[in-house]
Amino acid sequence: MNENQEPRIAGVDVGGTFTDVAVHDPVRGVVEVHKLPTTPDDPTDAIIDGLNALGGAPLVVHGTTLVTNALIERRGAPTGLITTTGWRDVLEIANELRYDTFDLFLRRAEALVPRHLRLTVDGRIGADGSEVEPLDEDAVREAGRRLLDQGVRAVAVGFINSYRNGVHEQRAAEILREAFPELTVCASADVAPEIREYERFSTAAANAFVQPLATRYLRRLADRLGTPPMIMLSDGGITTARAASERPIALVESGPAAGAMAAAHMATTCGFEDVVAFDMGGTTAKVSLVHDGAPARTHLMEVARAHRFKRGSGFPVRVPTVDLIEIGAGGGSIAWIDDLGLLKVGPRSSGAVPGPACYGKGGTEPTVTDADLELGYLAPDSFLGGAMTLDTAAAGRALDALAAGLRTDRRATAAGIADVVNNAMATAARLYISEQGRDPRRYRMVAFGGAGPVHAYDVARLLHIGEVVFPRGAGVASAIGMLVAPRAVECTTSLVVPLDEPDWDAVDAVLKDLEGQARAQLDEADVDPADVRLEAAADMRYVGQGYELTVPIPLDVVRGHDTAGLVEAFETEYRTRFDRVLKDMPAQVISWRLRALSSPVVKTVELATGAAAHSTEPVGSRPAYFAEIGDYTDTPVYRRAALAPGGTVSGPALIEETESTVVVGPSGSVRVDDMGNLVMTITSGDGE
């Protein structure tokens, strides 16, 4: 390779069931992909095996569920909190809201830091950022000693008003690191320098909780790769392993964000304006929205919910992230019978080990994949391109055991599992899209993930979506998304100003500081300063409202001190969300955001394909069940690689590629577009 030749770059997505690898070869201008089972005992084993299978790459972009799983399973380090006197119970008091008013047995997510490990010290910063009371440095040292003696290995420092002036937190963190180098120390103003102490303290505690685990994992991966990887962030950008190890909470939606970026790249390439990205893997299903080629983003999410579908039952983290909904409905989701005798699916998953019963690795409980195999959607001898043979007998035994409890037969049980999981995903998606003030019928769906193409037809019908697009390599789309993601960083700080009379000098100072922070991080990632693009936004609300809207702001508005433009940006976003504006109400900016990003390393994705004669003739057939028909029907099977642009296939049909299978129902027809995507049109979207 000559000095000017771009290096090979790999995207690696480690999921709960499978590890997906995509490698871009700049010499041939193509992307090669590989899918293999995740190795839970040491995820780096599957990463190395997958990379070796494709010839390796000197630059690796990695996405992982490590942080999310550690928070859900409470597998982080014993963590303490040092806070301002009087604020010891912020994590317990939370926002004082009941997430379910009528649930007499309501359970909250248990705080990551128990009360006996939350200690207070004197010292206070005022709301204007001035020092009201000096920090008691001796008390900080004593608190650190007490926490260390109680087995704490990570400490979050969260002081009141530190978003306005973090000097006390920075000094406390400095004292703790000097006195107790064995402790991991995290200051809330470094992680989430934003107003509202509960969200800020919660984010800092979560970051401290997972930081030792994430740091060990990233070091091990770097050792095995021979070089530090780049890491996928929750907001769809990528950063250095060092930056990720300091702020691992920013990886909480790392893998799902990569899938959204793949959908956004496809939307841009194909000229799609509004897209529902439907990503169904082995463990979970995710739904996100893409508008004008960019995934919707948010800056507050919940993790480790006591009730998966009840907002407020988890604890908040303030990080920029792709806005999505995630439910426990994947290929490995286990079907079971509840106390009322009703069939349920998920959220418990069989994972990679033992996996679904049909994997033949010791699993005995029926899963969505077992049902899909029974219904004829999957071929037992060509799963993962033939690299893995599915055990139909084991799947049948697992389904029979469940059928006995339901007092029905195997076919009805498998069909019931598919129906339950499809309705669960469609219901969650419908609620999520409605909360955004959107109508799903106005979108086209992009379906990917190993199980996404199998279930997209039924989910789209339930959502009244008439067109579904299946990109090439849909089964490994998240890994591909890492190749087309930009190196990016978002920096934030809170500065409250009235919308109609902002203090532009103060705003200029804030944005200059944020730009300096962002550019420093991109410099570390070897980004050419000339390739850096800036995007500004602000959190705004009407005075008296409890929550804000994040409003994109053109840079020339803030640079030109255009107050009218600032007001117009807010009212446009508010009207889009709520279909009205409150002209007589004063408004204010709460926080300012600046995102710096570079061009993606891989700008176009052309998947490598073996030589295959183009043909629209099926390569075989097998019985497959369709609810619209009410029975099994002999269904033609096509090889995706053989379908040439312009080719068409009428449903019912099954279109197979190595990483996934597209199920085309009786009301669907598929054409191959000029880019090799499969575009399915559904003539009836009533879902009945």
Image: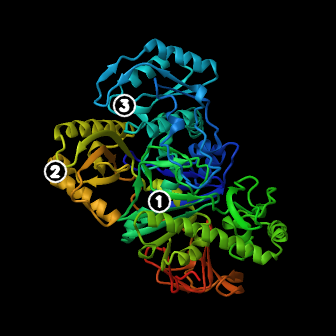
Q: Which residue sits at x=68%, y=75%?
A: 377
Figure quadrant of the C terminus: bottom right
Q: Which callout, 1 or 2, points to the residue nearer the camera?
A: 2
Q: Could you give the CA–CA distance between mark 3 and mark 2, rounded to whole angstroms?
A: 27 Å
**Up-down relation of residue 450 to residue 676 (above or below):** above
Q: Which residue sits at x=26%, y=47%?
A: 588
Residue 320: percent from left, percent from top: 42, 47
**Up-down relation of residue 456 to residue 86 (above or below):** below
Foreground residue among 212 and 224: 212
**Secondary structure type for disc 2:** helix
Specify whether residue 472 is in view: no
Residue under pointer 1:
260
Q: Could you give the CA–CA distance between mark 3 and mark 1, rounded to whole angstroms?
A: 35 Å
Disc on the earlier residue, 1 or 2 = 1
Task: Check whether the beta carbons of the residues at disc 1 and disc 2 lie within 8 A of each other.
Answer: no
8 to the left or right of 566: right
State the mark number for residue 563: 2
Residue under pointer 3:
161
Q: Could you give the CA–CA distance between mark 1 and mark 2, rounded to whole angstroms?
A: 34 Å
